[in-house]
Amino acid sequence: MKRRRFLHRIGSILAVLGVTEAEWLTLGNRYYQALAQPSSRKLALLIGINQYPQIPALSGCLMDVELQRELLIHRFGFQGSDILTLTEEQASREFIEAAFLDHLGKQAKPDDVVVFHFSGYGSRVKLETSPDRMQNALVTANVSQKSQDDKIVNYILEETLLLLLRSLPTDRVTAVLDTSYYAPSSVLGLKTRALQESVEAKLAADELDLLKQLKTQKLPSTPVVLAATSNPKQSAREGLFSGFSAGLFTYALTQYLWEFTPATTIQVALSHVENSLSKLGSKQQPALLSNQKNSLAQDVENFSPNLSPTKGEALNSPPSLVGKGAGGLGFPDDVKSQLLPDNTIGAEGAVSAIEEDGKTVHLWLAGLPPQVLLYYGVNSRFTLATTEQLVLRSRTGLTAKAQISKIDSTTPLQVGQLVQEAVRVLPRNINLTIALDTGLERIERVDATSAFATFSRVSTVVIGEKPADYLFAKLQQTPSRYGLFSLGGELIPNITGEVGEAVKLTVQRLAPKLSTLLAAKLWRLTENQGSSRLALKATLEIISDTSPSVVMQRETVRTFKTETSIKKSLPTPNSARAKQQLSANSTPIVPIGSRMQYRVENQSDRPVYLILLGLNNNHTAIALHSWKTPQEPNTADTKPLLKEVVIPPGETLTLPQTNAASAWVISEPALFNEQQLILSTAPFSETVAALNTAKYSTAEQSPIGPLLNSLDIAQALLQDLHNASALKTEINGTAADSYILDVNNWASFSFSFQVM
């Protein structure tokens, strides 16, 4: 684009904003001056829009920009002066495109790294050249303009954006689109980022001209474009967290990029990000956007896209659809990482400011798992690369204040230093929070609040006012019935009220399920694959007649094999099966009738003990049961008992230890399974004792089966992990009302898969 035209287009929007061109150029000196810097550079353009004229406001788009900016600076070595952010009214169509062409197009050189991010509404619009179909588009801050005859919309076509990305002179381009395009007829739960399409709307002439111009140019780049959803009808949602709102996809993605470093296959990262989305109440499946719709999921093994550091497990590959072919945004199976972190070790956050001569340290904690952040307590500890420990003194949202535990180092603290979790402090009085839908009448909300108040450890809030775990609302198809929903609007099955049933009766029906859901919330708080210091690896496999087929693998990322560790290789995965599964879903698919097992490798120098808990599709609790062999097998009234599962150092154990009589077989479709594999250096004495209080019949002695007293088990589990910590006496006044968990003593992996 000509410089004159660029200034003209910027001038028009600045006039509306009341900002002079000279003022804009002064504000922009920090990135115009960057033109003189040598290559290779890292450039970013981040867009976030909460406030739209005459459209319901979004809540999390500005936080998305902040999440991305802090990640790029502290984790990937971007200079703040090379990151341009356009937010709210600045993010007009003209301004976004002009900034793209000038900030990215003019400055980027071969081998430079470029990141583009958009958070805001998406929609669909018809082109006069293609009146028979709707096209995806990003909704900008100046949504529309009125003309005498037609409604002109200032959208940026998804196609235009893809062509702009491809026009850049570097292949090291990554874009993140936290938006969606199909607006649901009614929204239940979290806000969605999609506007209803308008068949009368027409694109602005300048947008069509730019699209036409781009189509005539040679487009050398093959960018990685990460989309919030893989299914066109899915909605990109945003959630309310601990004092802030954010896009679910952006938060899950950036949290993963903070904490994890290694990179192997796309399947690993996909399952991590989607696991996190599921725990946040959404069934979103992120995707790798492709122009070539008919050639998806080809040769994806060992794929590792631009935003992934090297070493071990995949860091950034949330997309599930991979295109390959002429004209598409396709990638061969040997694509390597392009955007590497400055430090190959992951972190839970970074030092953002220092006060009082180093006595008070401000932290940015975007690397903590989202479900853990809300309950992250005072006296939690972090370590620096210089081995000093920081003790958490207060926290508000993603920001916290901490103090150095012992000021005996000659190395001064510096802004930007990464911090890693050392001790996790969690309160003991954690409740299950139920949000009441605004679609309920006032008397219905009063009755629901009163009914839920009869349960211990259950509290209620109005949806959107405070963070919540689930939603109580009317069934949209049958408004005279009530039910419990995920925050993404998914109905929890088998617990809905009858037609015309009173609110209180429906709530009473929920009692057993509420206990299970609270239990699952508690064991999810143990997740620490990123921060654990135990050297462990766990693989979920399908057993076959030849060799096991790997479904997914988890391993701690901040530990390394020592020379004394026994190195046992895993069986070669069935890559054809993995590719087939990946082609359809980012969550692995397990066929009905499959025989399953976990293979757990203890690479540490200590024995570890194991517990497996989980939820199936109807949110029924399940557990791994390791049965003792009865001393008198012919005695009919012998009570079945469970035993500890222990893995010696350097050994590998398969679970369940299958034989013809006791095998874990997927016998019926459960659609979705979530399982938490938790390991500790100390025995799970209280957990096993609680498991043995349940009344199991001989017929129920399957290796993985129903968990009868899930809340008691979850509380006993946390107490066992607390007992394994050696730091209780050091943290005065905390142990009585908190669980204290030391990363040197436990590891917790999350696995999710579908059954079809």
Image: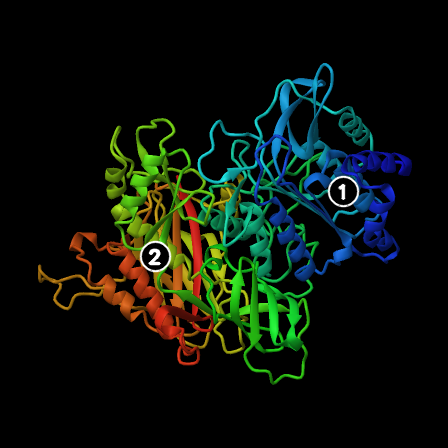
**Label 2 residue SS:** strand
Instruction: Name the residue: 65% across, 33% down.
Output: 139
The residue pinned by badge 2 equals 613
Residue 521 position within the rendered picture, expressed as x and y whole percent measured from the top left: 38, 54
Closer to the camera in the image, 561 or 173: 173
Q: Which mark's residue is nearer the viewer, 1 or 2?
A: 2
- The three-letter amino acid code for the residue at tag 1 is Ser
Instruction: Name the residue: 66% across, 66% down.
Output: 343
Residue 97 position within the rendered picture, expressed as x and y whole percent measured from the top left: 77, 37
Q: Are marks 1 and 2 in contact (CB under 8 Å)?
A: no
Can residue 169 be seen? no
- The three-letter amino acid code for the residue at tag 2 is Leu
> In the picture provided, is 105 more to the left or to the right than 401?
right
Q: Indicate which disc, 1 or 2, sits on the residue closer to the N terminus.
A: 1
Residue 221: mark in rendering: 1
In the rendered view of the protein, which quadrant contains the N terminus? top right
Closer to the camera in the image, 662 or 279: 279
> In the picture provided, is 303 more to the left or to the right than 590?
right
In the rendered view of the protein, which quadrant contains the C terminus? top left
Residue 724 position within the rendered picture, expressed as x and y whole percent measured from the top left: 38, 74
**Label 1 residue SS:** loop
Where is 414 relative to 269, above or below?
below
